[in-house]
Amino acid sequence: MNPQTPNLKTGNKLLLLFICMLCFTTISKAQGTWTPVATGAPHYNDGVMLLLTDGTVLVKTSSGSDDVYGNTWDRLIPDIHGSYVNGTWTTISPMFDSRLYFSTQVLKDGTIYLAGGEYGTGRSFGEIYNPAIDEWRKILLPLATDTISDANSEILNDGKVLQAVVLSGTTVSHHTYIYDPVTYTYSVGPTTIGVDNESAWVKLPDNSFIFVDVYSTNSERYIPASNTWVGDASVPVELYDPYGYETGAAFLLPDRRAFFLGSSSTTAFYTPSGTTSHGTWATGPVIPDSLGAPDAAAAMMVNGHILCAFSHTPILDTVFLSPMEFYDFNYLTDSFTRILAPGGADTIGKPSYQSNMLCLPDGTVLYASQGDDQYYVFTPTGGPLAAGKPTINNIVRTATCDSFLAIGKLFNGITEGAAYGDDWQMATNYPLIRLSSNDTVYYAFTYGWNSTGVRRDSLSDSTYFVIPSTIPPGNYSLCVVANGIASDSIAFTVCDPAGVQNITAVKNAINVYPNPASNFATVEFDAKNGGAYNIKLQDIFGRTTREKNGVAVAGTNTYQLPLNGVAKGIYTITIRSEAGVYNTKLVVE
C-alpha cells in the first residue's frame, strides 16, 4: 500500500521547514580556518599555554611526575619564517611540583609566575620560571593553611600579582595575596566581599578588574588606588550553573564593554563607569543550541570577534558533557556563528573544560585539547582592528649592540587576549618585538614594560628588548606586536656585536677578562681624573646582581668582580664615574 501523498500546500511547508533546518545546522567555514601543527608535541597537553616574551610558547603537559598531573612543559618555537604551524618542539626543565588547574602570569621581567593547583602536589605553593637560564624557583605562602588550588590571579600595573585563595583551612576563602617579583615573597592582600572561587576576572581600562561572586549575581571590583574590593551592580542573569557552579571566560570588548560567557547559555555585558562608581550590567545574547561554557577556553581574535568553545549546559549529576562545539561571537551584532572544530569535524568528543587557547603574535590562535599531542592554529578572517594597533614613536639604544628601548602607544593592546575562567590565565597584553628581513622572522626578548594595562589609547608605553644572538647583522623591518596585532614596521639595523664590543671597549676605556667567566671577572676602566665610581652587574631582565661603590684613582683602575652565586647567562657591566658611563657585556658560564 502506497503512503498517502500530501497536498501541495503541505508539501511546500515541509520543504520550507527542511530548508530552514539546513540553514540552522549548516556550519560556517567563512569565519576562519584550522591548520594542524605539522609536528606532534613530545607530550600530551594538560592545560594552559603561555606566550613568552621572545615569541616562543610554553604548554603544560601531563608528563614527568609520580602522579598523572605532570610537572613537565613543552616549548613550541616558530620556524625561521615565523610559522608556528611548522615550528619545532623542545622540553624545558620540570617544575618542582605537579599541578593541574592553577594560576599563571607572565611577569614584567619575562619570567613566568604560577601558583596552586586544584590537583597535584603544588596546591599551596608557587614557582617562578626563568626562561633565560631554564630554571625554576619555589615560593611559599605566608600561611601554610591557605590553599590556592584553582584560584584566579591578575598582574597589577606595578608588576606585582594579586593572587586569590580558594580555601583557608577547610573554609571557603575570601583571602588574597600580593606577590612581589623583586623579593620573591607574598604579602597579605585585600579581602574579597563575596566568594571568588570559579570566577572570571576582567581587567578594565582604569586598571581595576571585575568579577561576579559565585553562588550569586553580585559583582565586585578591585580598585588599585585603594587596594580594596568594592561592591558593584547586580547581574541581570545567572552566569553560574546550579549544579557545578561553573562559568566561562570573560573579555574586555573593543567597544569597552566587558562580556561574560555563562555556564547555562547565559551571557552578560558590563559597561564600566570609568570611576569608582558602579557600572551597569545588561543581559547578553543566549548561547545557541542549549550550549554553555562550564569551564571553557575562548580567545579574543585580532578582528575583535571571540573564538568560543562550548558544550551542552550542565544537568543534575553531570556538569561536564560532551561533545565540544565551536562558535564565533561577533560583538557588533551580538551573534554567535557555529564553525568547524579543529581537525575539520563538526565537534570534538570532549567536554569544553578540556579546551585550551592562546593568542599568537602572528594574529592566529593556538588550540589544544587536554590529552592530545596534536595542536592546531586558527586563522580568522578579516583584518586586525585599527583600535588595537600599536604605534612606535622611537627606538633608543640603551647599552651595546643588542639592547634597546622602544617607546610608543598601545603596546599592551585593548584586551588581555585569551581567557578560560578561573582555572587558567593566559593573557598576552604585553609587547613583543618582531624583526623580519625578506622571508625570515625573529623575535627579540622584551622585558620591563612600563604598563600591564589595557586600552591605554594615547598614554605613552615602552618596553626594553634584547636582540637574539642568533640574528645575523643587517637591515630589518621592526614592529611591536600586542595580542597578535602589529604596528607599522620601521627600518632597523642589527649591527655586529663583536665589532661593537671592540669599539665600545676602546671608546669607553673599559676591559673585562676573562670573558666568558665563572668564578670572577677582572674589570679595568679609565677614570681619567679619579673620583667616586659605581660598578653594577645586571642580568638581561635589568635586575642588579652585584654592585660596588668606590673611589677611583686617576687613570686606569682594576676591580675584581666576584661571580659566586651568579647564575649562568649574559650580563651587562655598567660603570658610572666622573669620566662618564661605561658599559660592556659579560658572559657567565
Image (tube, helix red, strand yellow):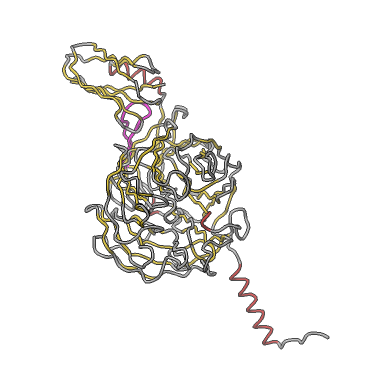
Total marks in image: 0
Instruction: Look at 32% across and 41% down and name the residue there.
Output: 449
- Image quarter of residue 166: bottom left
Magenta stretch contains residue 395: yes
Is residue 547 depicted above or below 371 in this figure?
A: above
Q: Position of residue 211 (x, y in %)?
A: 35, 60
Residue at the image point whose x is 44% and y is 65% from the top: 262
Q: Return the x and y of residue 336 as percentages of the image width and height.
A: 50, 65
Q: Is residue 440 left or right of residue 568?
A: right
Name the quarter where the C terminus is drawn.
Answer: top left
Task: Give the left or right position of residue 375, taking residue 488 as reference.
Answer: right
Farthest residue, direction right: 1
Residue 583 in magenta stretch: no
Image spot of residue 448 (x, y percent): 32, 38
Q: Is residue 198 left or right of residue 290?
A: left
Name above or below for residue 410 compared with residue 327: above
Q: Position of residue 566 (x, y in %)?
A: 35, 24
- Reply above or below: 284 against 221: below
Location of the N terminus (image quadrant): bottom right
Which quarter of the picture shows residue 237? bottom left
Which residue appears farthest toward the front when viewing the image?
A: 170
In terms of image quadrants, where is residue 11? bottom right
Q: Nearer the viewer, residue 548 or 504?
A: 548
Q: Which span of residues is magenta-colored?
A: 393-407
Q: Main secondary structure of the magenta part?
A: strand
